[in-house]
Image: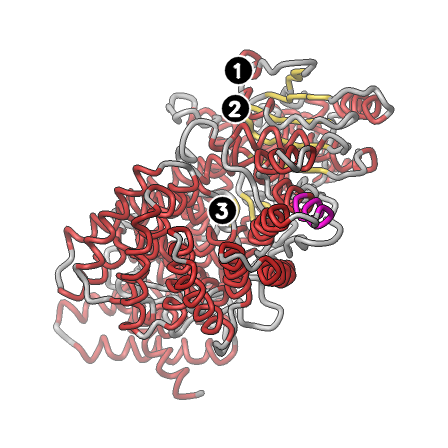
Amino acid sequence: MEAELAALAASGATALVGLIVSEGFERAKSGLARFFGRRRAWDEVAEEELQAAHAELSRARVAGDPGAQAEVEARLRQRLEGMFQEDPGAADELARLLSELAPDASRTFVNLVSGGVNHGPVFQGAPIHGDIHFNVPPAPSPTGRPVRPDQVPVMTVPFSNRTVELGNLEARLGALAGGSGSVGVDVLFGPPGVGKSAMVWRCAERARGRFPDGQLYVDFGALRDQAAPLSGPGGDVSEALAMCLRSLPEGELGIPDSLLDRTNLFRSRTSDLRILLVLDDVNQAAQVRALIPKGAGSAVLATSQGRIGELAVQGSARLIRVKPLDVHGGLELLKDRCGPEAVEAEREAAERLVRLCDGLPVALQVVAARLDDENLSMAELAAELDDEASRLAGLALDGEESSVSAVLGPSYRLLPPDAARLYRLLGWLPFGIFDVGVAAIAADVAPGSAKRLLGVLAKASLVEKTQDGRYRMHDLVRLHARERAAEEEPRTEQTALVQRVGTHYLVLSAFADRELRKERLRIANLADLVRDARNPFAAAGGPPPLEWLDTERSAVLAILRQAVSHELYTLTWRLAETFSVLFLYHRYLRAWTETLELGIEAAEAAMATAETAEEIEEITAGAARLRSLLSRPLLDLSENDRAGEQLERAVALAEATDRLALQASVQEFLGRYLDVVDPAEAAGAYRRSLELNERAGETRGAALATFFLGRALDTQGDHAEALVLLHRAQQKLENREEPDRRMAARVKAAIGVVHSHLGDTGQAIRELLEAIRELAEVADGMQYEAQARVKLADVAQRAGGHEELVRECLSRAADIHEALGDRPWAEELRRRLEDPDE
């Protein structure tokens, strides 16, 4: 330990000597004096001693006397060693100070202190990715009683005023709950930072008992973060509907693809419910119209920055202007935060503060934080902000509220250097809600340091801690932070930030991917990235990987777009491939399509700059994999021509590599495409897939190809060969070290269908009944259970004498399709129930 302290002190002394003889010494002198005076090591003479050292070192340099310089360095080393022994925190403080004052000269010392974690504006080390620092709420069970949704964010700061407005809203909600038979829609609009969301959240909190079926919440601002176009007009509305449907009874297992179908299903599922739906930051009338529930006594509370004309929603919607707080309201907020006595003691200055903040609660919260934290009178702070407002009066701030800028400017300048840097970099994140781990990676500091710095920002009301342990930055604050970053950070830092955060998500997505599907084909070689990272999903009590992927979907999509714009092409295509595992479970078709298209664009761009044969081969394989995956959502969206184009290109790219498993996978995707557009040709693709899988030693891939080939041959009339292949596939899937029960049950259902084609009705019914039982017991088996039930109903109906079995199968299949969001199929099956002989 003594040797380590001596080495640390020696490195620190060397960095100090470099700073003392530099041109920046005068600027650094007072900060260094405060550091050395922290334990009264030099006390009040610290600055004089530093000045003397500066003079001595200058003379030594002129005289060419290395001995004199070594003597000064030895004195500094001795002082530092004593300080580090007395207070271990001194080394960390000196590292932060030197990182700010002399990043180049202090690099070695900073690395020794932090083990590679940088405390200043220069990227120093290699962070270890892999931590998750918020609680992922468990998803409701797909079976059993659904969890009552209670999604409106909780208030984390005192709520002041708005007594009349809240009273009016509550009276309106009370009338609805009293049996008016209508659905209330209220849209609160006003400038950013005026407190619209806080007012609605407070109202929802007080009205919780009036909505027995729960409260749903959609933040359209976050959805706009999530998607540039969200794949076309109405994409955010479609995604909002999907979010709500997943939280309602029967909604977890599947959602229709089209906006119209989602809207209709939402109305159907809410027809017997009394719910409150809170929509934050809407900017189109359609965002409100599509999300009006049908159940009598339900209500919608929406917030918007737009004018009345931009939100001319249909029906009896009320548009409520939310104005800035008047002087009385602003004083009440300050009393809540600073105490009534403090406000009354300086009432005139307090009123001036309210006016300087233009009555905007977000600005008043920052002012209150400063008054609470600093030894400032209200008069002193009002004078300071008055000067700031005058300074900004002539500046064009690209729409930024000048009152908030006037408040944030001084608060920002008072932040410690490391907290100020974190604040700036958080403004560059392409999303507004983040956890400690993301903040740490964004600033390239240790998670413990990030948590401490977020505490500093939260105390200054620059970020807000959310109920799940993450942090939120208000849009106006983000705008200011982004402006500061653009002014003060190096030009390359935003790209470096996207690289760090994107890599963080890549590592975590890779871990989640492997926890969910160990045998999935993967192209990107991530061994070096994950080797030293901690897998949070494998730890006891760790977050469920699928729920984490779903929670972070918006952030990952935003990072993918940023990565492309910053030409981080390798990161982009690897993250697109890895994150695709989410969409194999939750079929967000538009988001899946966009993710893969971004990955393909990046892979093509990366190919142009690849330098080695290994890089070219990996990128080629990655592009083939991404294009073949893209065929899946395109087929589900009925974009068959585009799916065919992607597969044609994928086949050519895969064949340009030596990866047999990849070639086999692409041929399987091709076969599934041909099943839709040209069934007679599908068997050929499956045969090629089977042969390639066998050559590659891919036993599961071979079993799947055998299954698909058997089904294709049955369709073509070769029932005997189909039965042989299907039994072979079933055996391979059941006899694995980890049996694939779902796929084995699907094969069993296909075997039952073949027996029916061979005229063995009894065996067909037995196989299908067994497959249905097994599919009902496995995860993600419901859609295949419904398919098997329809097949069984067909067989039983043709055989005759099984009317009750036919009705039971069709009824259950219709219920499953309804739950999955496939209403056309459900309605078709119910029509068949009404006339089974049709």
Q: Is residue 561 above or below residue 662?
A: above
Residue 499, quarter of picture? bottom left
Kindly state the secondary structure of the residue where label 1 is placed: helix
Q: Earlier in the sequence, mark 2 or mark 1?
A: 2
Taking the image as drawn, is residue 502 in sight? yes
Amino acid type of disc 1? Glu
Q: CA distance from mark 2 to mark 1?
A: 7 Å
Left or right side of 520 for 263: right
Q: Residue furthest right?
A: 178
> At which x and y percent is residue 588?
48, 44
Q: Which residues, given as a range, are shown in magenta?
A: 803-810
Front tag of 3 and 2: 3
Q: Which residue is mark 1?
A: 310
Q: Earlier in the sequence, mark 3 or mark 2?
A: 2
Instruction: Tell me the crowding category of disc 2: few under 14, some 14 to 19, or many 20 or more residues within 10 angstroms, Cα based.
Output: some
Amino acid type of disc 2? Asn
Closer to the camera, 256 or 697? 697
Q: CA distance from mark 1 to mark 3?
A: 32 Å
Q: Is residue 649 above or below residue 686?
A: above
On residue 283, which mark appears?
2
Q: Earlier in the sequence, mark 1 or mark 3?
A: 1
Residue at position x 15%, y 76% in the image = 65
> At which x and y percent is residue 666?
30, 56
